Image: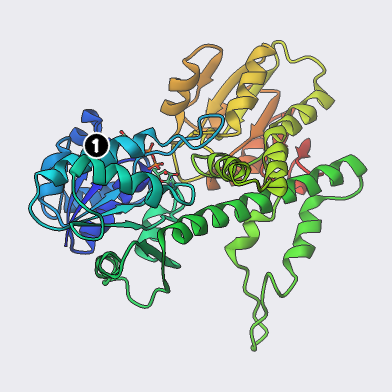
Amino acid sequence: MRVSVMGTGYVGLVTGTCFAEKGHQVICVDIDKEKVDKINKGISPIHERDLEELLSKNIGVNLQATNNLVQAVKATDLSLIAVGTPFDGKKIDLHYIENVARQIGRALKEKGSYHAIIVKSTVVPGTTDDVVLPVLERSSEKRAGVDFGVGMNPEFLREGEAIEDFMFPDRIVIGGIDEKTLNILVELYSMFKGVDIIRTNNKTAEMIKYTSNSLLATMISFSNEVGNLCAAMGGVDVKEVMKGVHLDKRLSPILADGERITPSFTTYLEAGCGFGGSCFPKDVKALIAHGKKHGQPMKVLEAVIQVNEKQPQQILSLLKKHFPTLKGVRLAILGLAFKPGTDDMRESPAIPIIKALLERNAEIQAYDSVATHEAQKLFGNNGIRYCDNLAQAMDNVQVVILLTRWDEFNNIPALLADKDPQPLIIDGRRMLDRRSIRKYEGIGL
Ligand code: NAD
């Protein structure tokens, strides 16, 4: 099929590249000329495992990038909308969605044939039918369901595993205003064999995405709250508690041959310094706001956000136990991205923690194998020395604060071996074996 993808961020570029790899003819559209130029050279503007390889393989073959949305609409059969949907402090900010819908509508006005417009961005239930569709009708002066189709196809990829998630989806959710739109989406995904497909209306498709993200965020805040209680009580380690919880056979089923399955789901039931990223915080807040609009308070989700926003303070409290003042204290911050496998720092717990440390005049050396450039955009070079490798970051510091679960940080105990005195390790992700470290503090311990 001939597909255009509007927006070449984490979702748009992965979607466009993977559909090209699957054999569709794809045009990626972005207003950011720098991104478009990079993509056309086969360079990925973001860090995502295997993305650049797939991009350079397909660019100029099945894939191209452009700033020209009108031409892209005219040259394709369907357009996927993958622009950002930030939270504006009160509600979901739909201005990118509305703008792009208006631009697509204007292009449709000049197009003679049928076109399907599919929202892939995460939007609150009702947005596709009540916002996108009317904008498209007004700007195209055509009729939805007659001249064009409107659908909703939420994206479930996880940054850091985005290519794998896209190529081997656990589910495909497709919403549409009519059978014709739904059938186009079925064709779009026809090469994904054996995957469960949910065919539904747009509003349900939108709600499935929010419910999935809200559930995962709830599990994290739940675990963090339990961890905080363990720490407050003393004598209980949340890690052991959660291990006991994970072994419930409803969470980790035991097969007939006695083998136990440990689903990755349980990784959301572990205490840490909080969730971040471009999705969980904004999506949960958007659903809370949407609930209010509909007279339905979302009390559980309000608590999820409250717990999460306070969680970085746990790191500062652990630090305070050892260093009542931080002026001149030499600290290593390990991990800047909100999770491993990505350079995305949006809403990363590292941000409030670094801000608080800078305010208290601590001396920071930071290391993240891929997110340094993002941190430099946020903090500049003021007060932070960015290191090239883990050993350099851990050199001559009094405290090491681990904030992202990068695999590489499993080398910390080995790197500590020849240090005397050893720095205090504050494990914000509870990823290290505390018995292997002389001075250890962790969330929920
Ligand atoms: P992003 O901010 O990384 O990318 C958005 C892109 O859209 C930018 O490159 C921007 O320049 C471009 N853009 C904005 N207006 C445009 C226009 N009129 N025409 C063409 N391009 C335009 O966003 P993202 O992280 O890819 O997220 C996109 C959507 O997908 C959001 O709704 C998000 O909630 C959802 N989502 C994100 C993830 C994720 O892991 N990042 C996962 C699932 C769903």
Task: Examine the rendered structure and indicate whether residue 208 appears above or below residue 63.
Answer: below
Identify the residue shown where x is 67% and y is 19%.
356
Identify the residue shown where x is 80% and y is 20%.
323
Identify the residue shown where x is 67% and y is 71%.
252
Mark 1 residue type: Asp
Q: Quadrant of residue 39?
A: top left
Residue 287 or residue 423, whichever sits in front:
287
Task: Examine the rendered structure and indicate whether residue 79 appears above or below residue 415.
Answer: below
- Please state if 134 lies on the left or on the right of 205 as rendered: left
Q: Position of residue 227 (x, y in %)?
A: 79, 46
> What quarter of the picture does the C terminus occupy?
top right
Q: Position of residue 47 (x, y in %)?
A: 37, 41
How many numbered marks have been drawn onto this rendered protein structure? 1
Q: Position of residue 30 (x, y in %)?
A: 24, 37
Question: Does residue 353 appear in the picture of this structure?
Answer: yes
Residue carrying label 1: 30
Q: Quadrant of residue 178?
A: bottom left
Residue 236 or residue 132, whichever sits in front:
132
Q: Secondary structure at mark 1?
A: loop
Residue 47 or residue 116, whichever sits in front:
116
Q: Is mark 1 within 8 Å of ligand 1?
A: yes
- Please state if 408 lies on the left or on the right of 18 as rendered: right
Q: Residue furthest bottom?
A: 256
- Please state if 174 lies on the left or on the right of 411 as rendered: left
**Mark 1 neighbour density, 10 Å: few (under 14) some (14–19) many (20 or more):** many
Q: Position of residue 21 (x, y in %)?
A: 22, 60
Question: Does residue 424 appear in the picture of this structure?
Answer: no
